Image (cartoon, coloured by chain):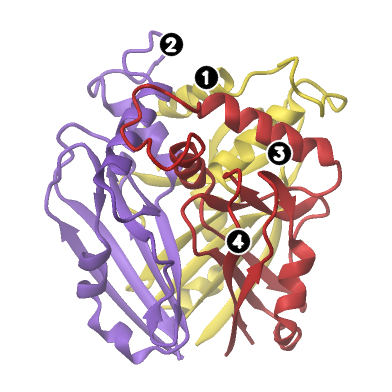
Chain colours: A yellow, B purple, C red
Amino acid sequence: MNIYQQQITLPAKPRGFHLITREVIRALPEMANIRTGFCQVFIQHTSASLTINENADPTVRQDFEMFFNKIVKERDPDYKHDYEGDDDMPAHLKASMLGCSVMIPIRRGELALGTWQGIYLCEHRDHGGGRSLVITAWGQ
Amino acid sequence: MNIYQQQITLPAKPRGFHLITREVIRALPEMANIRTGFCQVFIQHTSASLTINENADPTVRQDFEMFFNKIVKERDPDYKHDYEGDDDMPAHLKASMLGCSVMIPIRRGELALGTWQGIYLCEHRDHGGGRSLVITAWGQ
Amino acid sequence: MNIYQQQITLPAKPRGFHLITREVIRALPEMANIRTGFCQVFIQHTSASLTINENADPTVRQDFEMFFNKIVKERDPDYKHDYEGDDDMPAHLKASMLGCSVMIPIRRGELALGTWQGIYLCEHRDHGGGRSLVITAWGQ
């Protein structure tokens, strides 16, 4: 059983949902040594998140941004944590609804993603800056 | 450390939430060789998802379907991705809210689920068809 | 590759969101033997959940409780599963929105949490009682 790990920083992206499947694969070339196993991607932040969804039509990612803005409102007068910007508390909530990690099986030497699955970086802040990921793969 | 993996296709199920704990256990009998470890179930789709919840009363699963239909509306005029059916974009959103994998510890040779926990397949489409799962267990 | 596992019961906590990072680390001191690997925390219940979010300002956790109460209403007349208390069905729904496990990479012998990340126990019931966790770490 082998384990490989890499920490990378993705350059700042605009608020919204972004495909990062290629960046993840490129960051850990040692993954090629694994025939059966896993790749986990973990984001070390609380106002951005990771999910897996449709990898083809960019309007899906735009609808994600629209939808999560609708259900997690900014400037809700009930927020107590309101001093880091209107986008801050909603970003924390969205991050926990979507999650801070994804784990993808490796099968026959490749990420076992479905045809239409891609990894999304979900940037919930207006100016989130670079985002740090820990990518780990293990298996045999 | 041993690792076992199996890809299976679950036959088409109606839109809604379905218990699949037994199907998962049956699909990977080699799990019996693991005393301490994990079982991960990963769904290779973006309009169906997996979660763990109450395994006894079927009305819980019906309330899940009712609730997620309420908060993720069909025919929202703000959807841009609207040409694959009214149920398509909502299905993508629900899939990311619930997630595409579950990972259960194996303890003393058994899935360490709580008494009331079962694995749900969450079918978000009206006619989703068969659903492909990758089931992987590892440990010692 | 080594694997360590521990089952613990956290004492009953009030409804709301609670930081438990320290309890998790304390429960599995063998984690110190792992340089690169993972720690998974799994909750064996369907009306409490786990997530990772901001570890500093307690108002963030209060806003989590406020927000999830807003979007997952109690006493929705459409609930069919309504005989275990007003807080029961909403608790199941919140538990699946947030998830029943978190998995954190271990890097250079430590949990690779970001500066602001902590593990939350999300208690969705008014009187949930003690909560059982299975904590597993593995790696080399």
Q: Give the camera-side residue of A27 and C50.
A: C50
**Chain for numbered disc 2:** B
- Is the residue under label 2 in contact with that under label 1 (CB below 8 Å)? yes
Q: Is mark 2 on a helix, strand or loop?
A: loop
Relative vertical location of residue B106 with respect to residue B115 in this rendering, above or below: below
Image quadrant assignment for residue B76: top left
The residue under label 1 is A66
- The residue lying toward the viewer, choosing from C34 and C7, is C7
Rounded to the nearest whole Å, what is the CA distance between mark 4 and mark 1?
Answer: 30 Å
Q: Do the residues labelled 4 and 1 touch (CB within 8 Å)?
A: no
- The disc label shown at residue A47, or none: 3
Give the Cα distance between marks 3 and 2.
24 Å
Q: Mark 1 to mark 2: distance in Å?
A: 8 Å
Residue at image coords 25%, 77%: B28
Q: Quadrant of residue C81?
A: top left
Secondary structure state at the residue bearing disc 1: helix
The three-letter amino acid code for the residue at tag 1 is Met
Disc 3 is attached to a residue of which chain? A
- Whole-percent x and y of residue A33? 47, 79
The residue wearing badge 2 is B78
Q: Residue at x 55, y 36 (%)?
A: A18
Q: What element carries label 3?
A: loop
Give the camera-side residue of B31 and A27: B31
Quarter of the rendering occupied by the C terminus of chain B: bottom left
Q: Do labels 1 and 3 share a chain?
A: yes
Dot 2 alpha-carbon crowd within 10 angstroms: few under 14, some 14 to 19, many 20 or more: few
Residue C93 place in picture, x, y as percent: 45, 40
Labels 4 & 3 near each other (Cβ < 8 A): no
Q: What mark, if any, has residue A27 been given in the picture? A: 4
